[in-house]
Amino acid sequence: MYPPLKSGSLLSGGHIPVGEQKALVLLDKSGQKVIYKTFRAGEAMPTHNAPVDVFVTVLAGRLIITQEDQPTEVTAGDYVILSAGAPHSLSCLEEARILIFR
């Protein structure tokens, strides 16, 4: 009747690598996604934007998320909400794991 239960660990790091950064789409339903990403210290995401509001929460590590040239340092337990269309980038200060809801 229902699809099988999906489960996994976000702490063990067992997921598919995508280039230097690793990403795993945990849920993709009606255009909304939950994405798990890991970064090594020194990795970065260049400036980009999203057509919808984006909620990012930091599970571990330390990053700088910049929106419209305004940097914000975030660490485990912090979150940011990026407005739809706002240019933003990410720079990883130490190994990090994040969840992205968009």
Image (cartoon, grey):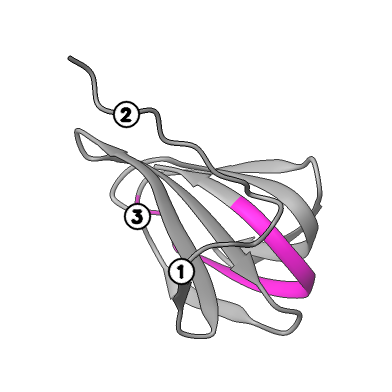
Q: Is residue 33 left or right of residue 7?
A: left
Residue at x-position 55% and y-position 61%:
37
* Image quadrant containing the N terminus: top left
Disc on the earlier residue, 2 or 3: 2
For the residue pair 76 and 49, the one nearer the viewer reads as 76
Q: Position of residue 81 (x, y in %)?
A: 56, 40
SS at badge 1: loop
Q: Is residue 62 left or right of residue 88?
A: right
Residue at x-position 47% and y-position 64%:
23
For the residue pair 92 and 48, the one nearer the viewer reads as 92
Q: Which mark is residue 50?
A: 3
SS at badge 3: loop
**Tag 1 residue:** 16
Disc on the earlier residue, 1 or 2: 2
**Tag 2 residue:** 4
Crowdedness near tag 2: few (<14), some (14–19) or many (≥20) residues, C-alpha within 10 Å: few
- The quarter of the picture where residue 38 lies is bottom right
Q: Nearer the viewer, mark 3 or mark 1?
A: 1
Crowdedness near tag 3: few (<14), some (14–19) or many (≥20) residues, C-alpha within 10 Å: some
* Image quadrant containing the C terminus: top left
> Which residues are the magenta region?
85-98
